[in-house]
Amino acid sequence: MSSTRTSENGAFRQERWSSSPTLDRALKSNLVAARCSVLDSSEHREAVWFVQFLSLHAGGLRWAAAEIAPDYLTEDDREKWLARLCLDPGSNNELTAAFPRLRDLMADYARQKGDGVAVTEIGRAVYQALDYCSKSRCLVMISGKPRIGKT
């Protein structure tokens, strides 16, 4: 059986790397990047990227749409509405209106993912360094012995 990532003559074919069914259901990152480039609010950009991240997971876009889309929309229309929020620059007003629900959804998702995660002393030091980095808007270098949990 031949590889789907090369042609008959053995030349590499880039488009075959993105032939996964996962990428068919996901919001395309280049389109989301274009949308985010015209958003003034960093919080709105983060929310749009969060929805794009969810779209990579089976049922993620449907789950997010069920949580934040208006109740009068059908299930399929809710997903289309959410995708339009993330891709259409003309939907700024709707994105602003939906943002509080998106922010709550991001917080719930982060809380669910963080439940049961043990934070070590090294982890706390790394978090403090990253918080400092974020607040001071500068780079930090985190160094230490190998295999102690810096990553």
Image (cartoon, grey):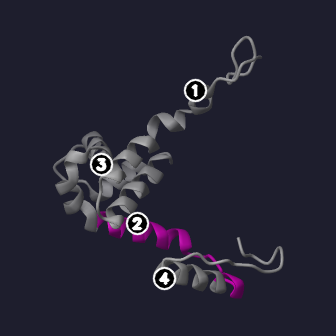
* Residue for point 37% across, 45% down: 34
**First reached walking from the N terminus: tag 2 or tag 1:** 1
**First reached walking from the N terminus: tag 1 or tag 4:** 1
SS for dot 3: helix
Instruction: Say which residue label 1 marks.
Output: 15
- Seen in the picture, residue 82 relative to 120 is either above or below; the reply is above
Q: Are marks 1 and 4 in contact (CB under 8 Å)?
A: no
Q: Is residue 106 magenta?
A: yes
Is label 1 or label 3 in front?
Answer: 1
Give the percent coordinates (x, y) of residue 56. 50, 46
Mark on residue 106? 2
Instruction: Say which residue label 3 marks.
Output: 82
Q: Is residue 6 visible?
A: yes
Give the percent coordinates (x, y) of residue 42. 35, 65
Name the one closer to the observer, 66 or 40. 40
Q: Is residue 142 left or right of residue 57?
A: right
Q: CA distance from mark 1 to mark 3?
A: 27 Å
Is label 3 or label 4 in front?
Answer: 4
Q: Is residue 59 left or right of residue 100?
A: right
Q: CA distance from mark 3 to mark 2?
A: 14 Å
Q: CA distance from mark 4 to mark 2?
A: 24 Å
SS for dot 2: helix
Residue type indicated by callout 4 = Ser
SS for dot 4: helix
Report the span colored magenta: 101-123
Residue type indicated by callout 2 = Met
Q: Are marks 3 and 2 in contact (CB under 8 Å)?
A: no
Main SS category, magenta section: helix
* Residue for point 60% across, 76% down: 116
Mark on residue 136? 4
